[in-house]
Image (cartoon, helix red, strand yellow):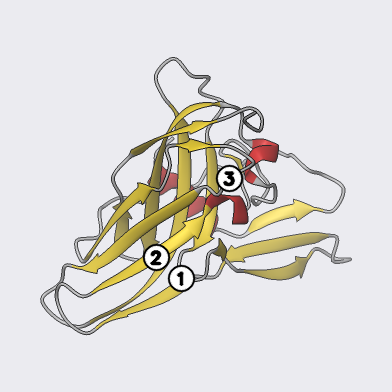
Amino acid sequence: MRASEFYFRARVALLLASQVAVGAQTEVPQRRGTNPYIRCVIQAQRSEWNPAAQAVLTGRIENLSDSPLEIAVEPILYLSPQPGGAQRNRYWSPVDVLNDRPLGVNRHSMGPKGEAEAIEARPIHLMFRKKGDSVDFRIDARHLLWAREVSSVWPSLELFTVVAPGTYGLRLVLGTESGDSESNDIKIVVAATRPK
């Protein structure tokens, strides 16, 4: 499934029944287009992630427009298995890149007795004064919450609790109203245990 579809799913209110952890998925129309106004580049401090060390990513978001730009973005990290890996091992994590934490959400009770909850991602706002202005960020993937892409629940587990050991491609998708901006893809190896 394309990253843009998952961005759209993050924007759609997710219904989470209090007693049900996994349920049927609703088909959501796929977002089309690329945002021509911003660019994102990421790199990993170390390409092997293990529970004993930080899993630091640094990056830059740049204004490509010819004028000042104020834009709301919903950043999501995606881990996809490298060729030969189990395709069910695809993960996502909505991230507040400015504050090194999971992306905030708005929650609303739903249903006649409030037994369900709607969750909507809270975008972060970026302001650029001119073309070429940029925002640098640094995040530790261990500070974020993760989930499998094929799931009806909002990410709620720590990196090494949910992500299977293996070799992955990692990218950051900045979802906006005018399309997505995808970063470069970097190779990450998730280790099974603490090194000796």
Q: In this rendering, does residue 66 appear at all? A: yes
Q: Which mark is residue 53?
A: 3
Whole-number angstrom distance, CA of label 2 to CA of label 1: 6 Å
Residue 175: % across, % down: 39, 59
- For label 1, the residue is 98
Q: Is residue 187 depicted above or below 98 in this figure? A: above
Q: Amino acid at mark 2?
A: Phe
Classify residue 29 as left or right of residue 65: right
Q: Secondary structure at mark 3?
A: loop
Q: Check whether the beta carbons of the residues at disc 2 and disc 1 lie within 8 A of each other.
A: yes
Q: Amino acid at mark 3?
A: Ala
Q: Secondary structure at mark 2?
A: strand
Q: In this rendering, does residue 30 appear at all? A: no
Residue at 14% across, 81% down: 67
Residue at 40% across, 67% down: 73
> Observer-nearest residue: 9 or 75?
75
Residue 128: % across, % down: 26, 80
